[in-house]
Amino acid sequence: LLVCDEAHRLKKAGGNKTISSLAALGCGRRVLLTGTPIQNQLDEFYAMLDFSCPGLLGPLNRFNRIFSTPIQKSQDRLASAGDVEVGRERSAELTRLTAPHLLRRSAEINAKYLPPRAQYVVFCPLSPLQASLYTGFLRTAEMVAMLYGGGSTTLLPLTAITLLRKLCNSVDLLMGT
């Protein structure tokens, strides 16, 4: 039995290294868990179901032709009445085909069976090395240019935030960055 939490990460219908590695384990029974709903992304839905129930939905090109394309076409605001009807029928067929393999629970239902959520905020001061590196990074020409303008920089804000976050968590995370 293979149980995969955070299954929404297995969302590439064409496969990826994670899917290939897990498939190579040779487990006949696979259970996928995710707290992230799959919202109108039929390719992600296909990828997860094809991993947990190989062959249930057929090959990807067939799935797209029979289910994905008609369903998506029916949701277009300019769809004809015929397209809308075909999309409804295909959606109902897909639901009928996959329902025995899905167990969906809302947060309200889960709350009845789980203890109340406890959240703790704990302040952990930076080590002297972390503080020194943090201050040094903020004083670099690229950071000054990004924060205060007045110069060109190739440093992107999200990259800077990621580096600072890694630094605050552990200096070891910066290795290979």
Image (cartoon, rainbow, N blue to C red):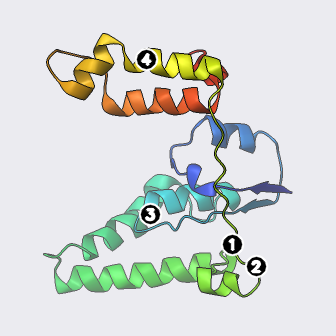
Amino acid carrying label 4: it is Phe
Q: Earlier in the sequence, mark 3 or mark 1?
A: 3
Counting from the top left corner in percent of width and height, residue 82 is at 22, 84
Answer whether labels 2 and 1 touch (C-beta < 8 Å): yes
Which marked residue is nearer to the observer: mark 4 or mark 1? 4
Mark 1, other Cα within 10 Å: few <14 / some 14–19 / many ≥20: few
Q: How much space separates mark 3 and mark 1, taking CA atoms?
A: 32 Å
Q: How much space separates mark 3 and mark 4, taking CA atoms?
A: 43 Å
Q: Earlier in the sequence, mark 3 or mark 2?
A: 3
Answer whether labels 3 and 1 touch (C-beta < 8 Å): no
Answer whether labels 3 and 2 touch (C-beta < 8 Å): no
**Horizontal placement of 129 versus 73: left or right?**
right
Q: Where on the picture, by quarter, is residue 167?
A: top right
Amino acid carrying label 3: it is Leu
Counting from the top left corner in percent of width and height, residue 124 is at 66, 40
Identify which residue is drawn at 57% across, 38% down.
16
Q: Earlier in the sequence, mark 4 or mark 1?
A: 1
Q: How much space separates mark 2 and mark 1, taking CA atoms?
A: 8 Å
Which marked residue is nearer to the observer: mark 3 or mark 1? 1
Q: Nearer the viewer, residue 160 or 96?
A: 160
Q: Earlier in the sequence, mark 3 or mark 4?
A: 3
Counting from the top left corner in percent of width and height, residue 129 is at 62, 17
Mark 3, other Cα within 10 Å: few <14 / some 14–19 / many ≥20: some
Mark 2 highlights which residue? Answer: 114
Residue 42 badge? 3
Mark 4 highlights which residue? Answer: 137
